[in-house]
Structure formats: structure tokens, C-alpha cells
Image (tube, rainbow, N blue to C red):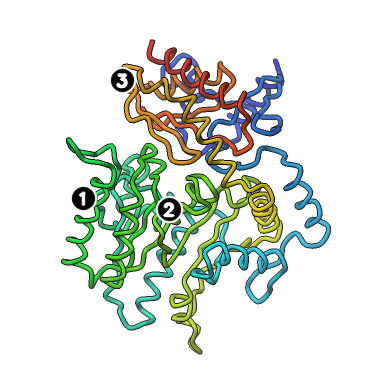
Amino acid sequence: MSLNEAWLARSQQAVWHPCTQMQHHAAADHPAHLPLVPIARGQGAWLYDFDGRRYLDGISSWWTNLFGHANPRINAALKAQLESLEHVMLAGFTHQPVVELSERLSALTGGALGHAFYASDGASATEIALKMSFHYWRNVGRPEKDQFLCLAGSYHGETVGALAVTDVDLFKAAYAPLVRAATVIPSPDFRLAEAGESPADVARRAAAALAAHLERHGERIAALIVEPLVQGASGMAMYDPEYLRLARVLCDRHEVHLICDEIAVGCGRTGTFFAHEQAGIRPDLMCLSKGISGGYLPLSIVLSSDSLYQAFLDDSVARAFLHSHSYTGNPLACRAALATLDIFEQDDIVAVNRQKSAKIAAALAPLAEHPQVRHLRQRGMIAAFDVATDDPWFSRRFYRAALEREALIRPIGNTVYLMPPYIVDDDEIAHLVNSATSAMTSALS
């Protein structure tokens, strides 16, 4: 038995893996088979198994890893932090990494979002933002504003509160009796364009639907939550910044909070540090996670406007925001985030990413002529295309074929997407695109 086989056997006996029908890991002869890949180490953009085979991490380990595995600069920052403080509770205490990180994130919003609240994962950040909005309206004497809006196809996490604003039936249907569902409004996804419509036209049409809903129900709406510019889990649906500009105006007009879920699209993914910046707006609440720690440690953050924060200040403890997690503001996670921000600043990563995204676009351009490729699209370091096929197991066939070609690329249904670490070089971009093209050919045959 090889080392890979030994670790696979032990894992299948002991580990319940996320987002997985575990039966598909075991059924090697089934078209839905999902190979379980044992990873021994990572280096740069590559992952290595126990038998020495390597895989280019084309999806940044679920959109988290920005600067490669075992990054020496982040490693050094964490080693230094380990020598001083590994953790202390944040209720009644504070520490240098959490203060510095909060200050730097606020500065990145131009001071518009002045206070940071901490948790450990994206779904928790969504829960926090929704609770903050709901509680704010109670604190200011508007308890009737207790409903939420989300976009069709939205995904904001899988805890019960986050599922309320998630519109992906696969994740939500089984738990419907537990969920206080939000109202779903049309998405500005530019794949929905009618004849002659531009992406901006689709955005304006979706914003008109939002306007109509707010005209009728605005007095009951606490917040609208959106994934700015790219709706990830529903198939990398991309839309024009015009929607965010109009949504900001409408939310202001009807006294509704705008929550930007930048968990997947923030930290340089879309061509600006925060995706919402491309619309020239700021939200009332912003959720961050995934890449903010460089893909190193669980960390999520909700940034709030000062006016929202002020509504919780009172002698009454009941008016305080009492949400908490044991590892809130963990010093190691905050130090990893600070090291990540250092790399952004010192290496001018946003500008570098614009050059790399252009190279990815050029490499992918020939796919636009493929007879089964639809909607080849890109926003910064996120590229995607849809594959026209009726094969219900296309995504699994593609995934297996990509692994055989030394690439980790995990489609969402019939949507193939590339979201590599920012450190990929020209050869690695070519390898990733060639692997995707070849894997698609294999999966379709």
C-alpha cells in the first residue's frame, strides 16, 4: 500500500468531508466519483501528495490562498507572533495584531467603515452583519425593519442565518423549516441579457426591480446583501458595477443597509482591493474572510460604519452587540492578515494582478471559439466559462481529468472557473489553461 493509499483509507474511516456526498469518494467506478486527494505539503502555487505527484492549485484552495502555500513572509510573521501571544479572549482584552489590523482595514475604506468585529469564517461574518442590521433598527426605534433582501443565485454561507440570504437550493432545501427566508430579487448577472442588452442594461433592469420592491416594502426592509460584481457559488455570475451604484442610491433613499459580502471577491480578486470600489460606493457593513489571512488561518471580519456602531452605545447591556466566538480576533490569524496586507502594499499587488489577469485573458481567449463554450468572462483574477452539455456528471469528469493533468480545478456544475493564487507565473498560467482545455475535451468525450 502506498502512502497515498494509506492516508486515504484512514481519512475515509475517520473524516466527514465538507460539501461532499461521502459515497462518491468511495465509489471509484461511478460517474459521480470524486477522488479524495491526500496532500502532504504545499509550495508556492502547487500542492503535493504523499507519493510526490503535484497539482497546480487553480482555485486557491477554495478561494483562500493568495500568495502561495508556505509563503516565507507570512511564515516568518506567524513564527514571530508565536513567541509572544497565541491567543487571548477579546472580551475585555485587546492586543497589538487586532488593533493594527482593524486600523489598516478601516484605512483601506478611507475611514468609512471605522470598527471591525471578528469571527472565524465567512458564514459567521454573514450572521454577524445580518444581526447587526436587525439589532440596529431595534435600537433606533424602527423594529418593523426586520426583513432582508438578497439576489437570485446568491450564496452567503450555510449556517442557519446565512442560509436565509442564500438562494442555492442544493444547500438550502433540506433546512427550509429552520430558515427565516429573505426575499429574493432579480440578479444583475449579465448572462441574463436580452437581445441588444449590454451588461449595464441588465444591471439597470435588475436595479429597477429592486426599486419597485423597495417602493412597496422599504419600510420593512433592514438590509440588502450582495456579493459585489461576482456571485461565486451560483456559477461565477458576473455583473456590471452600475448595479451597485444604483443599489446604494436606493438603499439610502429607503433607509436600508447595504451589506457587501466581500468574502470571496475582496482582497484584490476583482481588480481592486475591495470589489465595491469599482462602483465608487461604500457599504454600511462589509464581510471579509477567505483571502484576508492569506489562506493561512480561519478569520472573518465585519466592518461597520460609525453611524451603525454608535447606535449600540448605551448604558443598557441589552442594546450592546453580544455576539461572540471563543477565538474572536485570534492574534495569530490577525498577524497572518497583517502580513498579507504588507505583501499587498510592498509588492503593489493590485497593479501586478491587473497584468496577470490580462495574461490569463489572453491565454483563455481561444476558448471563445469552442462550439460548447458559453459566456467566457473575467473579472480581475477570476475567469470562468460555461460548458453546454447535458451530461449530469460533467463537473466530476472534468475534475478527475484536470487532476490527471496536474491541476486542481473544481467546476461548479457546468461552470469551469479559474481563481489561482496571485503568485502564478507565465508558465503556470499556461499550464492551468492548457489543463482546463484538455480536461474539458476529455470530459466531453
* Frontmost residue, 191 versus 168: 191
- Disc 2, disc 1: CB below 8 Å? no
Crowd class of label 1 (few under 14; some 14 to 19; many from 20; radius 10 Å): some
**Quadrant, the C terminus:** top left
How far apart marks 2 and 3 lie (CA) works out to 34 Å
Q: Is residue 113 left or right of residue 244?
A: right
Q: Residue 223: which disc?
A: none
Could you tell which of marks 3 and 1 lies nearer the N-terminus?
1
Question: The disc labelled 2 sits on which kind of residue?
Answer: Gln
Secondary structure under badge 3?
Answer: loop
* Frontmost residue, 70 versus 297: 70
Query: Residue placed at 38% from the left, 45% from the top?
Result: 231
| Viewer-nearest of discs 3 and 1 | 1
Residue carrying label 1 = 205
Query: Residue placed at 40% from the left, 45% from the top?
Result: 230
Question: The disc labelled 1 sits on which kind of residue?
Answer: Arg
| Viewer-nearest of discs 2 and 3 | 2
Could you tell which of marks 2 and 1 lies nearer the N-terminus?
1
* Frontmost residue, 293 versus 275: 275
- Disc 2, disc 3: CB below 8 Å? no
Query: Residue placed at 48% from the left, 15% from the top?
Result: 438
Residue carrying label 2 = 278
- Disc 3, disc 1: CB below 8 Å? no
Residue 190 percent across, percent down from the top left: 29, 40
Q: Residue furthest right?
A: 83
**Quadrant, the N terminus:** top right
Secondary structure under badge 1?
Answer: helix
Q: Residue 389: which disc?
A: 3
How far apart marks 3 and 1 lie (CA) works out to 29 Å
| Viewer-nearest of discs 2 and 1 | 2
Q: Quadrant of residue 319?
A: bottom left
Query: Residue placed at 40% from the left, 74% from the top?
Result: 135
